[in-house]
Image (cartoon, rainbow, N blue to C red):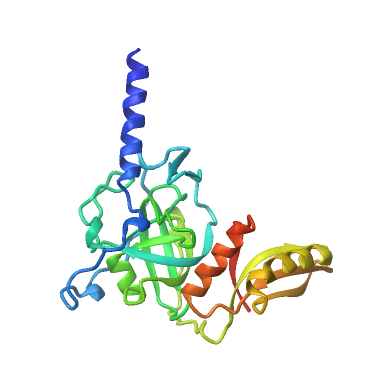
Amino acid sequence: MEKIINRINLYSVVITILSGCSVSYEKDEDSGPMPGSVDVSSIPNAIPRVEPKSRYGNPKSYVVRGNRYYVMNDSEGFVQRGVASWYGKKFHGRRTSSGESYDMYAMTAAHKTLPLPTYLEVLNLRNGKKIIVKANDRGPFHENRIIDLSYTAAEKLGIVQEGTGLVEIRAINPKTYGQRRAPVTTVVNYRSRELYIQAGSFKQLLNAENLHKALAEDDGRLVNISEVIINGQPVYRVRIGPITDIDTADRIVFSLSKHGIDDHRFVFD
């Protein structure tokens, strides 16, 4: 009986922490500190180090607003591209999903499914700026957001003013991070490349045409089919774009969800 009670208490703690974590849909009145009050350039990147998994932040799955999210066992090789948002004063000092207190001046972030903690390299796909953060929270629970950055992380990445930004995130293995050769400092100009949302990839042209027809009802001028050769065989990709702003991306993702398409991704041409 004592073991059962302990399990129930632990479950209650997990639910309490997850419900108190960063949730972007509550962030309508959030803000950062007074402009000029903090010199974010003096705040260093997070330093990847080996840590045990959070006891409370890694349930097998959890539910927020009726949606169930499944936590990954590990982050090895994880890469994701999409829209980043940020959170600040409204959550400053609150308990995160990992049990730590949220500090908007620290280099941290929230992710829906990565194990906590996970160290991430975050690249701004528009200006080439790159940072390293520690994911220690859950969120953002918005249909078209992949990561919620702390105020400082977002400021260093250059997305605070707009509120969102297109990013690529890569998981870092702390065990091998210190052994890597120092990266060459480069700024990649992504502005010269066009961004699309890929809705599907097919070996049969007919399947691509059927999806194109369905999506064209909402975004006829933006939907296109491109052909590439992979291992000597043609592959037909249904893409929507080019994407010029986050509002357009949000509208397209909402349209895809109406068609039951959740496995989309951002790609460059």
Q: Is residue 134 left or right of residue 32?
A: right
Q: Is residue 180 left or right of residue 230?
A: left
Q: Quadrant of the N terminus?
A: top left
Residue 6 coordinates in the image, percent (x, y): 32, 22
Q: Nearer the viewer, residue 122 or 1?
A: 1
Residue 201 coordinates in the image, percent (x, y): 72, 64
Q: Looking at the image, is 135 positioned above or below residue 126? A: above
Q: Nearer the viewer, residue 265 or 53?
A: 265
* Residue ID at (38%, 66%): 85
Residue 221 coordinates in the image, percent (x, y): 66, 79
Residue 235 can be seen, yes or no: yes
Q: Is residue 66 left or right of residue 160?
A: right
Residue 160 coordinates in the image, percent (x, y): 32, 73
* Residue ID at (77%, 74%): 227
Q: Quadrant of the C terminus?
A: bottom right
Quarter of the rendering containing residue 87? bottom left
Q: Nearer the viewer, residue 195 or 51?
A: 195
Residue 182 can be seen, yes or no: no
* Residue ID at (71%, 65%): 214
